[in-house]
Image: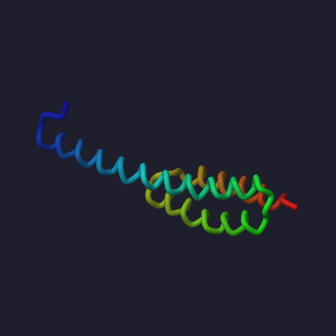
Amino acid sequence: MANSPQSKKRARQNEARFQINKARRSRIRTFLRKVEEAIASGDKDAATTALRAAQPELMRGVTKGVFHKNTASRKMSRLASRVKSLG
């Protein structure tokens, strides 16, 4: 348990940051899920549109420190190749 004023403030800051990061991660996952659903349905136009919408969200997560840059790049690369392979 936090005892000093500094550690109490730190605990408050950590909780606030956790809530913000949780919301960001959830938002990004929603965008990624939309791409996955479009790929599953086989609609290349919808998948391309969803991918274009997801890309800036994923990169924003990188700049905010929610995801590592390589993780985001790997996800984008894999999704892009799957969208490209659609008929």
Extreme residue toward the top, this view: 1
Left or right of 20 in this view: 74: right
Q: Quadrant of the N terminus?
A: top left
Residue sticking out furthest to the right: 87
Horizontal and vertical percent for residue 71? Answer: 60, 50
In front: 13, or 29? 29
Residue 73 in the image: above or below residue 50: above
Q: Which residue does the image show at 79% across and 64% down from the upper left?
A: 44
Quarter of the C terminus within the rendering: bottom right
In percent of width and height, residue 35 lies at 67, 58
Determine which quarter of the picture holds residue 49: bottom right
Which quadrant of the figure has residue 41? bottom right
How many numbered callouts?
A: 0
Residue 51, percent from left and from top: 67, 64
Q: Is residue 23 left or right of residue 9?
A: right
Q: Residue extending furthest front?
A: 41
- Residue at figure coordinates x 29%, y 45% from the top left: 15
What colouring does the structure picture have? rainbow
Depth order, front residue of 71/44:
44
Q: Is residue 58 above or below residue 22?
A: below
Indicate the position of residue 79 as horizontal and vertical percent values: 71, 55
Q: Is residue 4 left or right of residue 72?
A: left
Taking depth in this image into account, of 60 and 85 the one nearest to the observer is 85
Q: Residue at x 53, y 56 (%)?
A: 28
